[in-house]
Image (tube, rainbow, N blue to C red):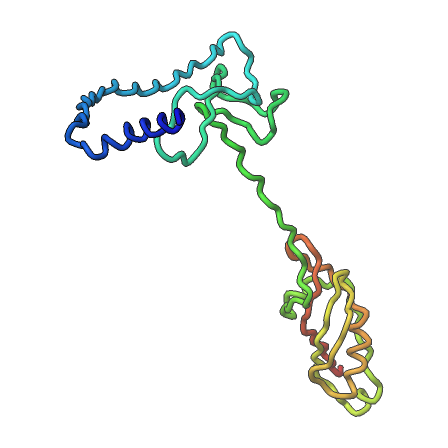
Amino acid sequence: MSLAAQILICGVLLIAPLFFTGTLPALRIAKTDIFVERLPPVPKPEAPTIISAPTATRSFNPFRPVAPTRVPQGPVSEVVVEGPMLPGGLVESGIVGLPTAITTLAGDRFTPPPPKPVIVEPTPPTAPIQVSGGVQLAKLIKRVMPAYPTPARSTRVSGTVRLLAIIARDGHVRDLRVLSGHPLLQQAARDAVSQWIYSPTILSGQPVEVESPIDVIFELR
């Protein structure tokens, strides 16, 4: 009974405020003041200062990297390497340790040497060169006179046999072809001209083959 009484009293105390809402204290919301504090601007970082090392007491070494003394602005189209200047402004290629491709030091950039000229050896032509008969006759060093054929002499045949000869590089007659002439005189002309020897024809320092006409004249006396 005591426990039931206590539970009843607690229930009345909890339920009673629900019926007497006018007596409940009013809820007040306190105003909160908001203060905005502005921070000072962040200082910009200072550009690093590049101090080049003194080069007066150092020996020149083209392979030792050197720090630049200025910072390029915008896109860089070429790389400029700054280095100490030697007395006289020139670096000879004979210095030990300097590449042979670097011959001069102009200001602060290296200048490569000009390319070597390419020498092309002339090649002799593969086809024989056409030469007039008079020019080739001046180079004749051995001439064999043709024998007059007996049938042609007995029939009183005379005239000129025209041949086309190919003269080799050593001056000997390599090939003969009959262009015109009496048939009784052609073989005698071929036998004689095939033994002729010319001085070699030189073109661009090289002997070449020559194609030249040759006239063999047969006369009855």
Query: Residue placed at 60% from the left, 29% from the top?
Result: 100
| 182 relative to 173, above or below | below
Describe residue 85's horizontal placement relative to residue 21 as left or right. Answer: right
At 20% from the left and 34% from the top, the residue drawn is 19
Q: Is residue 65 left or right of residue 70?
A: right
Q: Residue furthest bottom?
A: 155
Q: Residue at x 70, y 74 (%)?
A: 214
Q: Position of residue 193 (x, y in %)?
A: 78, 73
How far across and how far down the image is residue 157, in percent? 75, 88
Q: At 79% from the left edge and 77% from the top edge, which residue is drawn? A: 190
Instruction: Give 180 or 210, whichever is nearer the viewer.
Output: 210
Q: Position of residue 164 (x, y in %)?
A: 70, 76
Which percent across, then down, holds residue 74? 35, 33
* Relative to 207, 195 lies left or right: right
Quarter holding residue 50: top left
Q: Is residue 86 above or below residue 198?
A: above
| Residue at the extreme right | 150
Residue ranking furthest to the left? 22
Q: Considering the image in quadrants, where does the N terminus appear?
A: top left
Camera-side residue of 166 and 188: 166
